[in-house]
Amino acid sequence: MSFSLHGVGVAKGVAIGPVHILRPQVEINEFSISDNQLPEEIARFKSALDLAQQELHRIREQMPLIYPVREHHDTVLEDFEIASFIDPHMLMLEDSMLTQVPIDIMLEEKCNAEWALQIQRERLVKVFEAIDDAYLRARKDDIIQVVTRIQMCLLRQKGLLEENPLPPPAGSIVLADDLTPADTALMLHQGIKGFITEFGGATSHTAIVARSLGIPALVGVRHARRYIRNTDTLVIDGYRSTAIVNPEQKSLQFYKALQLELKRHRHQLGKLKKAPAITQDGVDINLEANIEYPADLTAVNRVGAQGIGLYRTEFLYMHRDNQQPPNEEEHYQSYLQVVKALDGTVTIRTLDLGADKQVEGISYKKGAALATNPALGLRAVRLCLKELKLFKPQIRALLRVAVEGKIKVMIPMVSGLQEIHQVKRLFDECARELSQENIPHNRDLEIGAMVEIPSMALCTDFFLPHVDFLSIGTNDLIQYTLAIDRVNEDVSYLYNPLHPAVLRLLKIILQHAEKAAKPVSMCGEMAGDARYVRLLLGLGLRNFSVSPEILLEVKEIIRHSHVKRLTKLADKLLKTADPQTIDAIVSEMNNPA
Ligand code: PEP
Ligand code: MG
């Protein structure tokens, strides 16, 4: 019988194949252990810890093997980044919260090791769930994954775990309760077509790795193992966040045809690499790429982006061993690497830590109380202006790298003019210091600001004389305009780029910039969303910066657009607040009669 299940699609695409249930549902039961059996039970627990460590070591050693098979995928995550997802698990396996506390529980409760771990898992999950910060809260998944790994080792020792043979056969779709990022990273190497998990969210590390490797995947498919059997045929539709179990012949044909179509489309899009981003009525559009790591340059060059419209430098501060911020030389080297690898201009955004991007010891101090509203607190330029020791090495590196290539500097989360003046004064001060130290630098670089806060959007005319360019960060602009935490799934249904207030603000910014004859770009996700590209053209946007994966699709849309027609429709759109009328106009923009 055919049926479908729904989850959260974390990587787009379609996968078809036989199911391979990686881990059957296992129950963790409680047993009493007598005093004289306890030493043996503790020894069993310790050897399971060793086994779990060995498993992780093995996976880590296999890492370099994974990458040569990724020729069709973007090199978004480097080996060291994948490893950085495994290392925390290895560290947790050495932490007394998992090595000693379960033993204490065993001694106290006189229970088996699996049960003691289950008790400790529940306690730790509660602690993590109470954390305000979404990123840290999501780390509870790591705890669950590590505890499950140890429990599996314990059950295996007792011959209680009936597992499917590992590795799963090439061509299969893996179904599991949860997968670690390490499991996921191995999948491409093993020829796995896609995966489904019962747990996990869209921002988990597992989801990040799946997206980066381009493996169609669904997470959070509740009770999937209750309904799906080994060797059932499965279709993962990552676009509609659906899994179809034992599809009817017609449905199977549809998805096979869709797979072919997607492959053909990808191939066709590849041909647009050198084509200009120009509309049907001859309007030239500047199309740039967003990057997080220098490693993203492979993908940028593959799609032939005209430049980098957003380089999010805060990733330089993450995954660090020593909890020390990068020094001036590290900043300089990573910017230099990007500048040297590209012909176009590189727009480097100054540090934007805080809110959902926190780094212990840098954006918050260990043990300090967490801010009640971190997104409205000490974030981005506010943090930089408070912590000059953090900011000045970045500014000095930027001034130095400006000698080597064409860069622009962009300030995030500006809410008032004084912040721009303060940043510029710091650039002057650092330039003076570099002159005194006889270090080559270039103060003649363009400094722009991101428009992410309504206070700035409404007053762009006042800001424009003081900046060289603007870039609209819609991810935050929408969050702050509609008062919707962008990482809170409970209110995500209200996160609407088509809200009349958002559209009005965009129009205001674009009109002011046009009047002042200053360039304005958009680097938020809205610019790379195929549904909104024509709307943005109609509103007057001429500079887009999008993720490299989507860049050629955006270019294709631009090349099939007519700005004059879209401008008229956008004017109509700005006159209504009725959601149905708005949808109808956007559809008309995207599907000309
Ligand atoms: C934005 O807010 O739209 C943006 C590009 O910045 P980030 O997503 O890094 O906050
Ligand atoms: Mg932002």
Image: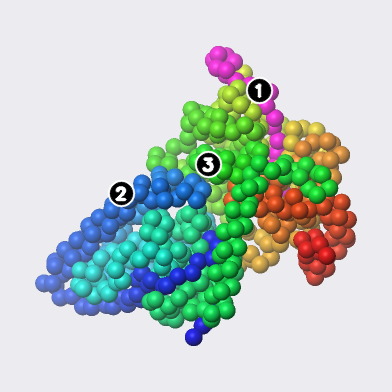
**What x and y, as percent, mark residue 103?**
23, 64
Tag 3 residue? 298
**What x and y, as percent, mark residue 115?**
28, 72
Q: How is the image coloured?
A: rainbow
Vertical comparison of 118 with 281: above or below: below
Quadrant into which the C terminus falls: bottom right
Q: Residues within 10 Å of mark 3 (few under 14, many from 20)?
A: some
Mark 2 element type: helix
Question: Seen in the image, is 501 located left or right of residue 266?
Answer: right
- Between 91 and 108, the residue placed more toward the observer is 91
Residue 33 seen anywhere in this rendered image of the structure: yes
Residue 61, numbered circle: 2
Vertical comparison of 548 with 43: above or below: above
**Displayed quadrant of residue 301:** top right
Tag 1 residue? 443
Residue drawn at x 62%, y 41% as measured from the top left: 304
Mark 3 element type: helix
Residue 126 seen anywhere in this rendered image of the structure: no
Residue drawn at x 69%, y 49% as measured from the top left: 555
Mark earlier in primary sequence (1, 3): 3
- The residue range painted magenta reads 433-454
**Displayed quadrant of residue 110:** bottom left
Mark 1 element type: loop
Q: Residue furthest bottom?
A: 1
Residue drawn at x 15%, y 75% as measured from the top left: 34
Q: Amino acid at mark 2?
A: Glu
